[in-house]
Image (spheres, rainbow, N blue to C red):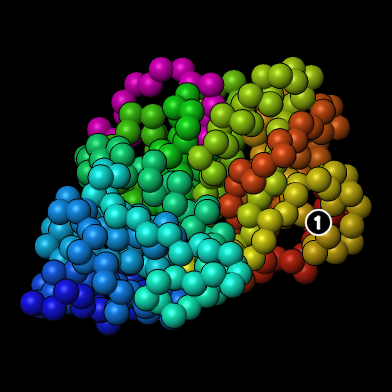
């Protein structure tokens, strides 16, 4: 039996169907393999694993070999069993291998190659290997891995419940209500929900409003079995602002956090933003920095950088150009302050469906202070077909209509 076999399938795409198809291809290759260990891929900077005499050092209980924290090899039989039962939600196929890391640390054999410039790795013939990893990949793992680890430890969330059991359980009054308005987001909202389940604070509820989707968005919303999740429906599409006001009526928390169905939260978002408002009773809203991602067809979201939400909303409104009109991201509101100004701009014409975030924050902060947390707490995905990007040219006309 060969000690190592490289599987040939490569990750492609970010939709739920593409993720499932990639899993199925990997599973079929693993079934055909005759090796004890298999790898989904070995990047150029880890090709030395082919010739490295690692097998004699690995304990029997290990089923996954990680190099510099990145999973590279699995025992074939363990991988087959894990893939057969795996049914999760990811932002893109390329993160599947990270989601397959065992929860039990004893099952992971870790190797480190992070040496300083000029040092070498025995048997590898390479130097300073970590520097060859693209910086975007390093940040991908920094932002994705904590969510994967947190939700892997709660398998009870990962079975499919009935719609009734998922949507009608009475919940204890939470500190934070997370509101998510979605329309045709079946391919992205599963990862958004998973980021909520990964929160370090459990004092939240998630209220999802399906604004008359005609895909499987409702099915995706009901996938996770957690009594803190509630789903509301609109029979016809009325726009995000109208749906958010309906969700606000249902919210029980003293704080309101917005989450779009194609974005996701950092694990400490609920805790840090709510603590900031607890400590600043004069503030009506809390924000932080966010990571900026671009959605691609082949790779899903690709990290581009981090942005501070330091621009005041009045500066955004005074701008004549959409490019300078950045909304505050993330946005956690004091519920009483939000309700006092009447919530979102509740109109259903074309101007009522765009730039609602800039409008709301500008009105709220006319009466209340803003508190900022110095951390990256939100992940915002930008893509060209979104309503905000398609409506960029309408920003000057929208300003005049307010």
Mark 1 packing: few (<14 Cα in 10 Å), some, or many (20+)?
many
Residue 82 at x, y percent in the picture: 18, 56
Q: Is residue 171 magenta?
A: yes
Q: Which residue is mark 1?
A: 325
| Residue at screen point 63% across, 54% down | 291
Task: Please say whether residue 8 is visible from this viewpoint.
Answer: yes
Residue 394 at x, y percent in the picture: 77, 65
Side (left or right) of 305 relative to 155: right
Q: Which quarter of the rendered picture does the N terminus lie within?
A: bottom left
| Residue at screen point 47% across, 36% down | 199
State whether residue 22 is above or below residue 106: below
| Residue at screen point 39% across, 29% down | 228
Residue 134 at x, y percent in the picture: 56, 72
Side (left or right) of 170 relative to 239: left
Residue 88 at x, y percent in the picture: 30, 53
| Residue at screen point 46% across, 17% down | 173
State whether residue 239 is above or below residue 168: below
Q: Secondary structure at mark 1?
A: loop
Pick the front one: 397 or 7: 7
Side (left or right) of 151 relative to 234: left
Pick the front one: 72 or 257: 72
Q: Quadrant of residue 153?
A: top left
Side (left or right) of 59 relative to 157: left
Instruction: Give the extent of the magenta segment.
Output: 164-178
Q: Is residue 244 magenta?
A: no
**How many numbered circles are shown?**
1
Pick the front one: 174 or 180: 174
């Amino acid at each position: 039996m060969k000690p190592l076999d490289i599987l040939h399938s490569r990750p492609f795409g970010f939709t739920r169907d593409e993720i499932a198809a990639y899993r199925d291809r990997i599973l079929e290759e693993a079934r055909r393999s005759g090796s004890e260990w298999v790898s989904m891929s070995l990047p150029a900077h880890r090709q030395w694993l082919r010739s490295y005499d690692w097998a004699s050092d690995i304990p029997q209980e290990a089923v996954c070999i990680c190099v510099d924290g990145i999973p590279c090899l699995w025992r074939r039989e363990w991988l087959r069993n894990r893939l057969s039962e795996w049914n999760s939600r990811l932002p893109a196929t390329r993160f599947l291998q990270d989601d397959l890391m065992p929860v039990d640390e004893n099952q992971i054999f870790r190797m480190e190659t992070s040496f300083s410039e000029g040092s070498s790795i025995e048997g590898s013939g390479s130097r300073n290997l970590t520097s060859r990893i693209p910086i975007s990949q390093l940040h991908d793992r920094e932002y994705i891995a904590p969510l994967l680890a947190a939700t892997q430890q709660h398998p009870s969330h990962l079975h499919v419940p009935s719609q009734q059991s998922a949507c009608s359980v009475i919940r204890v009054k939470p500190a934070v209500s997370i509101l998510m308005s979605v329309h045709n987001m079946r391919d992205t909202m599963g990862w958004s929900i998973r980021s909520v389940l990964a929160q370090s604070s459990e004092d939240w509820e998630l209220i999802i409003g399906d604004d008359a989707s005609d895909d499987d968005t409702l099915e995706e919303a009901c996938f996770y079995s957690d009594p803190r999740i509630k789903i509301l429906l609109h029979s016809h599409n009325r726009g995000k602002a109208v749906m958010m006001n309906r969700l606000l009526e249902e919210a029980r928390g003293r704080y309101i956090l917005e989450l779009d169905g194609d974005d996701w939260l950092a694990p400490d978002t609920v805790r840090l933003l709510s603590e900031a408002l607890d400590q600043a009773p004069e503030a009506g809203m809390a924000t932080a920095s966010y990571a900026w991602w671009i959605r691609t067809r082949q790779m899903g979201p690709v990290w581009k950088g981090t942005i501070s939400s330091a621009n005041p909303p009045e500066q955004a409104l005074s701008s004549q150009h959409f490019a300078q009109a950045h909304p505050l991201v993330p946005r956690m509101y004091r519920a009483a302050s939000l309700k006092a100004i009447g919530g979102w701009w509740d109109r259903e014409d074309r101007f009522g469906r765009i730039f609602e975030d800039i409008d709301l924050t500008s009105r709220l902060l006319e009466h209340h202070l803003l508190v900022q947390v110095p951390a990256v707490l939100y992940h915002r995905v930008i893509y060209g077909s979104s309503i905000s990007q398609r409506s960029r040219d309408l920003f000057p006309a929208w300003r005049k209509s307010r």
